[in-house]
Amino acid sequence: MFFANGGKISANLKHEQSKIVKYNQLLANFAILYNVNAMTEVFNQLKSEGYNITREHMAAFSPYHTEHLGRLGSFEVDLTKQVKPMTFELLVE
């Protein structure tokens, strides 16, 4: 996942390079936040269905995925789509 120009920094200007690096870090942080929220919802759903989810189970999962990303894809943001609230509470012992 890259912000603009496929992650290539074409300008030889320090402030432009710094901006691209910061935006790419922000994009990665958004992806991680999304994954943490999705994982929290799934763990809570499993817990509500009666599964015994522990911290040891969760330790096998990571919100930082480095494989299977659509790096060459084009992603568009739908600003008309209603965003559901994030889940902050994790119901695990």
Image (cartoon, rainbow, N blue to C red):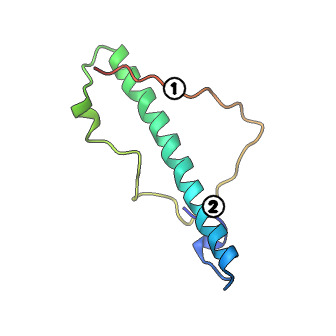
The foreground one among 19 and 66 is: 19
Quadrant that contains the N terminus: bottom right
Instruction: Name above or below for residue 73 compared with residue 60.
Output: below
Q: Residue at horizontal 52%, vertical 49%? A: 31
Q: Residue at horizontal 66%, vertical 82%? A: 10
Quadrant that contains the C terminus: top left
Does the CB distance between marks 1 and 2 fall below 8 Å? no
Q: Position of residue 9 (x, y in %)?
A: 62, 78
Q: Secondary structure at mark 1?
A: loop
How many residues crowd mark 2 within 10 Å: few (<14), some (14–19), many (20+)?
Answer: some
Q: Position of residue 33 (x, y in %)?
A: 51, 42
Res. 20 image quadrant: bottom right
Mark 2 residue type? Tyr
Residue most extreme to the left: 56
**Left or right relative to 51: residue 44:** right
Residue most extreme to the right: 80
Q: Residue at horizontal 58%, vertical 62%? A: 24
Q: Position of residue 27 (x, y in %)?
A: 58, 55
Residue holding disc 1? 87
Q: Residue at horizontal 61%, vertical 26%? A: 85
Mark 1 to mark 2 CA distance (whole Å):
25 Å
Residue holding disc 2? 23
> Which of marks 2 and 1 precedes in the sequence?
2
Q: Secondary structure at mark 2?
A: helix
Mark 1 residue type? Thr
Instruction: Name above or below for residue 7 compared with residue 60.
Output: below
